[in-house]
Amino acid sequence: MKVLAELMEQIQSRGDLLTILDAKRGDIASTATAYAQAAFGGATVNGLSLPSWHADACTVNPYLGADAVEPFITAARAATPGRGLFVLVRTSNPGGGLFQNLPAPQEPLYCKVADELVQWNAPGVGECGLGDVGAVVGATNPVELAELRARMPQVWFLVPGYGAQGGTAADVRAGYRKDGLGAIVNSSRGVTFSFHPDDPNWQHAIIAAARKAQHELRP
Amino acid sequence: MKVLAELMEQIQSRGDLLTILDAKRGDIASTATAYAQAAFGGATVNGLSLPSWHADACTVNPYLGADAVEPFITAARAATPGRGLFVLVRTSNPGGGLFQNLPAPQEPLYCKVADELVQWNAPGVGECGLGDVGAVVGATNPVELAELRARMPQVWFLVPGYGAQGGTAADVRAGYRKDGLGAIVNSSRGVTFSFHPDDPNWQHAIIAAARKAQHELRP
């Protein structure tokens, strides 16, 4: 957590980068409110000011229902500047379909999560035509990705699964809107594990991996 | 986290209490493994020994599928002494039914989660007839609680919703097996928020609230 705090501070001191805290929070009531306040704007309890990650966005697990999501929407919209969140809809891990793909009753469960998300997002849609409640949609199934893009035209997508998990630049294309906006493609292990632990020039490997991803993902 | 660490240490130094870390973890792969190792037995990475909560059990969110649960089962069974987990099945919060109660396709989604859980639990069933992969099942709907008890006879239930959330001792009865075993009824706010912040004798209020719960829940 110290390393994360230092990293967040370095990123924020630059002023030109946004941060997404991939905490996958999934709790309710006072705990969810505390998580949300810790992620975004901080909180004051009994006169004691509690620390915050000052993240620009946070990921949230929907299994517990609207109570698990709403405290994050409230805290995101109350913060200055405004923040946002990404709700797990259709994740990219091998077992993601076990429950998410269950017909419920006609369509998969993740479609129901998507439909709720559209409602949560609507009040936060800005001039750019995108809102503050995003969706995590994996890159590993381009057909589902395209269907969800059509279903949620005003929703930001956070797209894991590109790189180390096997998704290609062609696979993630379906996540963007026609104007080339609307998706944030994430490469974690593909960049941070791009070198051998003994490599003294590991920084170069990281820069090369980041540039390669940037090049592949250019529209 | 310092307060939690002190509390865990105090509980463990007594030697006669078990701890359930209600972290509601919901992640995959290396992150889930790290969470599981941190919860139970600790881990060694590159020769560096990482700290552990040394909890006896941990709660886990199933939305990401088997990948989100299996690292906890592996770590629980690898630890000495053995540990366990509780998977969120049907939670007690007001919005818990939004997705959990969706027909998928004939029965609610939480029944599908329960059926998977029975499979995960089976290899860990001990002489007492109960296993190491438990279920979180809220007290706020006694009919569902009874159905799930019948569906998962060898599964430990962790039952929130009693007390502050409105569930009564009569409501939680359906969570027990006929032999009076199989359920752990949790009262958090009902005990820890049982006094006024200005009350100098707050310890007495907590003891009284805990004794009241103990009395109500006695078979």
Image: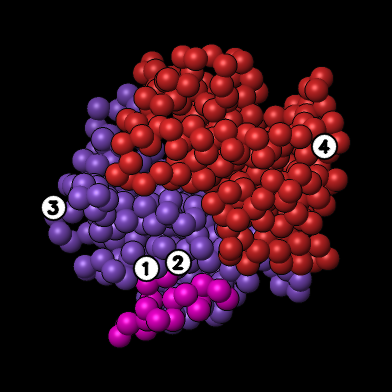
Chain colours: A purple, B red
Mark 2–mark 1 contact, CB under 8 Å? yes
Work out which quarter of the rendered image holds the N terminus of chain A and state it: top left
Q: Quadrant of residue B133?
A: top right
Label pair 2/3, CB-CB below 8 angstroms: no
Q: Tell me the element at label 3.
A: helix
Residue position for label 4: B177
Residue displayed at 42% across by 20% down: B9
Disc 2 and disc 4: Cα gap in Å? 36 Å
Q: Which chain carries label 1?
A: A
Which stretch is magenta?
A115-133
The correct choice, above or below, for A203 with respect to A126 in the image is above
Cα–Cα span, label 3 and label 1: 26 Å
Q: What element carries label 2?
A: helix
Q: Are the numbered discs 2 and 3 placed on the same chain, yes or no?
A: yes
Count neighbours of disc 3 (C-alpha within 10 A) and say few if under 14, some if 14 to 19, many if 20 or more. Answer: few
Indicate the amino acid at tag 2. Glu
* A108 to the left or right of B189: right
Q: Distance between the residues labelled 2 and 3?
A: 29 Å
Q: Which amino acid does label 1 sit on?
A: Thr
